[in-house]
Image (spheres, rainbow, N blue to C red):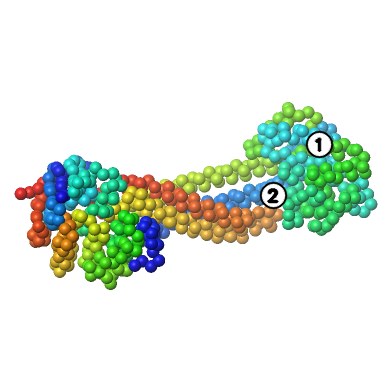
Amino acid sequence: MLSCGEVTKVYSTERGDIEAVKAIDLAVPKGQFAAIVGRSGSGKSSLLAMIGGLSRPTSGTVRVEETDIWALSDRGLADFRNRRIGFVFQFASLLPTLRVIDNVALPALLRGARDNRRAYDEAAELLARFGLSQHVDAYPTEISAGEQRRAVIARALINAPSVLLADEPTSDLDEETEREIMEQFRAMNRERAMTLIMVTHNLRLAEQTDRVVHIADGRLAA
Amino acid sequence: MVTGAIDMPGSHIRFLLGTLALQNLGRRKARTLLLLAAVAVCTGAVFTGAVLMRSIETSMAVGFTRLGADMMIIPAGTLTNITAALLTAEPTDLTLDTSMLPRLERLKGVRKAAPQLIFRTDASGYGRGRELIDLIAFDPDRDITVQPWLDQHLDRPLRPGDVIMGGRREEPLGSEVLLFGRPLTVYGKLGKTAVGTHERGLFITFATLDELRDTIRQICGSKAPLEPDKLSGVLLELAPGSTTQQVRFAALANFSGIKIVAGESMLTSIRQGLAALLNGVLGLMVIMFVSTALMVSVLFSAIITERRRELGLLKAIGAGRGQIIGVLLIEAALATALGGLIGCVLGVLLMRIYEHSLVYYLDRMGIPFVWLNTTTTGLIALACIVLASLIGVAGALYPAWRTSRQEPYDLIRSEG
């Protein structure tokens, strides 16, 4: 179970405080594939960042299973993000100066628990699963946007997280690639009982998930 | 698989983060070149300055000491005919006591006190018949006017049983000279000084004199200078900032039975002025390094601003604060060390130009310029590169630390 208890996020700007997320309560059962939909600026990405341990809520709690993630220490939270959460961002989030396989193996290497050979073997397996075997030694700029996105998903899975968070994962991709990625999400959700939360403004994509959560003006909409 | 990856947990991530740092330098070539150029200029200036400063110090030690002592203390009543540089005491039967030496060295304004004992005789057996010689005993550890004039010497340290010949003597190095029936090895030969006593003198250490003393007294009788613990004079080098007047008054207030001869005051002023100038150069170097650290800090603030998304991403996938700081500091250290290396190479080229211009003219004018040896120059270059690298790390530390404290989402959503 993943739950948010009255999470609020206020951004302080020169023009005053902006309340992006307003006391949202949300519970996502383990293994559910949920979509958070809303217009740009509705607060959906801010909510996802708080759930993923990327942005501290101004108030409220986020629990992943039994862990109150914002009660963790800096080191503990970094470790939690590394082991338990997989991220797929809306931008091209591969490090351009590392090879594709280095990018995919990076979270495992940061974890430091496995030897290098095992981390790279697992990265190679994931890349093969996503049809990127021929690109293991390529640099991100040498592969297409769709292939980059698949590599990012492979990276998100390398530490076998219990939660996968995706922020507009298909925003700049063609329909064919978008369909492939959604199929992969559904397969992961089904095969690994992984909790998936996807932020999107695309209702057609959201309808392919188990549950759609609407957010407007920082609040859950009916 | 990664070729050559070291198969230990944690080892490859350090390699990858190092690679990340190195490759980031290549991504922004103009910015990296600017950073390298700035560090190279600073390090090159400091390296060149340090080598030249040390070379000038060495040259001063040789060249300026060759101009003689600043002052000389001799027994009261000694007749002096000092028209040239103060290089040796004057031959006299009057003596000073060696017990005054430690007190003299402690006198305010005195940097070095070099004792000498001079004994004029025609009974040494040196040369043809009864040739008159000045046998001058000196202390090699305190000496300021004999060894700086060594133009040639054997390839070993000076030791008891050796004699150094004045500039007008002809004996070859390593040959034996019989003095009072005792063979002494010609260790070295001095340059010509135009100071008669110095040019014709035979210089031995006090230890050699002690070995010869009984023989000399048997041949020459118990003349006063040959008594143990006696000196003919003490040559003084003044500390920077002190004047001959100050030391003269201090010496006269503390010792009786002495006479003080001052050297050319202009030379003393030049020597002291140069010492002050070198200290100023040192201060300038410190300022240059501090300004480089500030510049690196500003540049790295800009570099980090450009890479906020990438750093945020690293944090999002589990990089700790230490790893974020580490990757930025490695980048700073690599860039500044490389800049330092380039600076040292440029410094060497600059010194080659200097060698072919100013040093060449100085040599032609008879002013010696003594370059540091290769090992010391190499060590200074290494120290400059390490220092440049440390300055880079110091400069990047604050921006890196500040970035490591930021939340991943704040870093990710800001545009690079």
Residue bearing mark 2 = B62
Left or right: where B307 falls relative to B329 = left
Q: Quadrant of the C terminus of chain B?
A: bottom left
Residue bearing mark 1 = B229
Tell me the residue at 13%/55% (across/down): A32
Is residue A171 at all visible to an observer of this figure? no
Q: Nearer the viewer, mark 2 or mark 1?
A: 1
Where residue A14 sits in the image (x, y, percent)? 22, 42
Estimate the spatial distance between the alpha carbons at disc 2 and disc 1, rounded to whole Å: 29 Å
Where residue A113 sits in the image (x, y, percent)? 32, 56
Circle 2 packing at 10 Å, graded few (<14), some (14-19), many (20+), is: many
Left or right: where B119 falls relative to B62 = right
Left or right: where A86 falls relative to B293 = left
Where residue A121 sits in the image (x, y, percent)? 30, 65
Tag 1: amino acid: Asp
Q: Which chain is home to disc 2?
A: B
* Mark 2, secondary structure of its residue: helix
Tell me the residue at 55%/59% (across/down): B348
Residue B131: assigned label: none
